[in-house]
Image: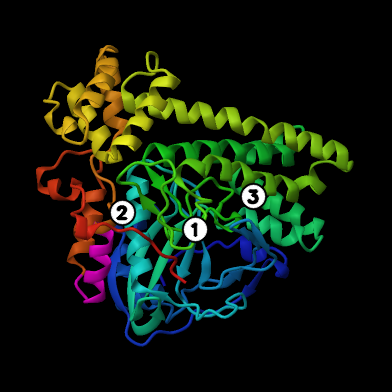
Amino acid sequence: MNISFDNTYARLPERFFKPQLPAKVPAPELIRVNRELAGELGIDAEWLESDEGLSVLAGNAIAEGSEPIAQAYAGHQFGHFVPQLGDGRAILLGEVVSGNGKRYDLQLKGSGRTAFSRAGDGKSALGPVIREYILSEAMAALGVPTTRALAAVATGETVYRQEGEVPGGVFTRVASSHVRVGTFQYFQSRGDVDAIRSLADFVIKRHYPEALQAEDPYLALLRNVVERQASLVAQWMSLGFIHGVMNTDNMAVSGETIDYGPCAFMEVFHPECVFSSIDRNARYAWGNQGNIAFWNLTRLAEALLPVIDEKPEDSSRKAEAVLNEFTDRFADQYVARFKSKLGSSEVVSKELIQETLQLLASQEVDFTLFFRHLTRSAGGASTAELEDLFKNRDTFGEWFSKWSAMDVSTEGLQAMQRANPILTPRNHRVEQAIQAAYRSDYSVFHRLVNALATPFVDDPANRDLEARPLPEEVVHQTFCGT
């Protein structure tokens, strides 16, 4: 078997996971292998595409050196704590070290029941496999820290979901690790301080080795996670991305985007925009994601308190001081990204950013298209397409006069071109790829993945993928894969 595993998580104490073999599937069919990513991981893509490789990707065979496990974790789900969640439909095959020395997890999603499945079947419908492949690779191309897609497989079996009987699939996910805020909470809820310390040591060694040089490594760990999450969520929001289910078990301490369930890219802008069918109170709306990140980080800090300092009052004081850094870091990242989107790091004010977003909301303007056409206007193109996005031309004209007065420089234009993608994975296009895949037609999926690999390139062949959906194509809700 052509994967060189070097597994460290499986050498942690037994209470961190449960050994678990993937369930075998009847008729696996390879949909796609991410050949470029396979090369980065030192895995032979041709072998992955062989019958032997397909057997591993489907869960029908275990590669030499793999130690399949289901990881234990807990989490707050929509604000309510669940003391045991864990990998209910995912199995960590093991870890590989890339050519640049970075370590990655290889995980199968949809590979059958585990000790943490509760009432679930442990399987995945093919739709969530297609969605996560498209979205995670699109995010990577946009420069967002994210888990990645190594492969998508159809299993040849049927699963039962809200839409009835649908084809099943298995997704192979690559991540810097799968340690979540909820992993720490799992041991916190059990009063297992030794496990919290072991987990913190593992995370420091794997993700933040510089923390070992700090006076207090565990406090430095918290600060590093705070910094990465502040940057990550600000970047999400600058792209109009809504995670959809920012539970603490869906926040990776590595600072990567993880778990592409009911996520979406906004089309018509509104700060309270929600797509997730299970987010009935808009807890995870676009404009609330910074607040939720802070809330989740506070739960991480609570779990780390016993190892930060022996004295509870000192531990709380130190953790609070680090948490309080989040607000400024997030605000700085958010403002910096929107300044780039508007063309100037110096002239654009916070007030103009807010005025711009209020304008988009009141005029029900497509978020991606607005910044796309604004970038073209800054480069000297006609403003006609930009104006056409607005219901009230006079309101737009007043705003545009203020923006034009900045006189975007060459450097500012280049910043806009780097910050404002031409293509994002529009919800109706993702849904079209899913529905075609249910009919065993993967051409829509492949075209979308290929186009989204270069989201800042103006390719006339992909012009239709830029367009807003027709009224009958609008996707109002997205769903979890369970």
Q: Earlier in the sequence, mark 1 or mark 3?
A: 3
Q: Quadrant of residue 314?
A: top right
- Residue 47: give x, y in percent of width and height: 32, 69
Q: Amino acid at mark 1?
A: Asp
Callout 1 touching callout 3 (CB < 8 Å) = no
Q: Looking at the image, can residue 39 be seen?
A: no
Element under disc 1: loop
For this orientation, the residue located farthest to the right is 311
What residue is shown at x 47% (from left), y 41% (from top)?
287
Return the mark for residue 435.
Answer: none
For this orientation, the residue located farthest to the bottom is 26
Q: Earlier in the sequence, mark 1 or mark 2?
A: 2
Identify the magenta region: 429-441
State the residue position of label 2.
Answer: 36
State the residue position of label 1.
Answer: 279
Q: Quadrant of residue 440?
A: bottom left
Left-right relation of 230 to 141 = right
Query: Distance from label 1 to label 2 (Cα)?
Result: 35 Å
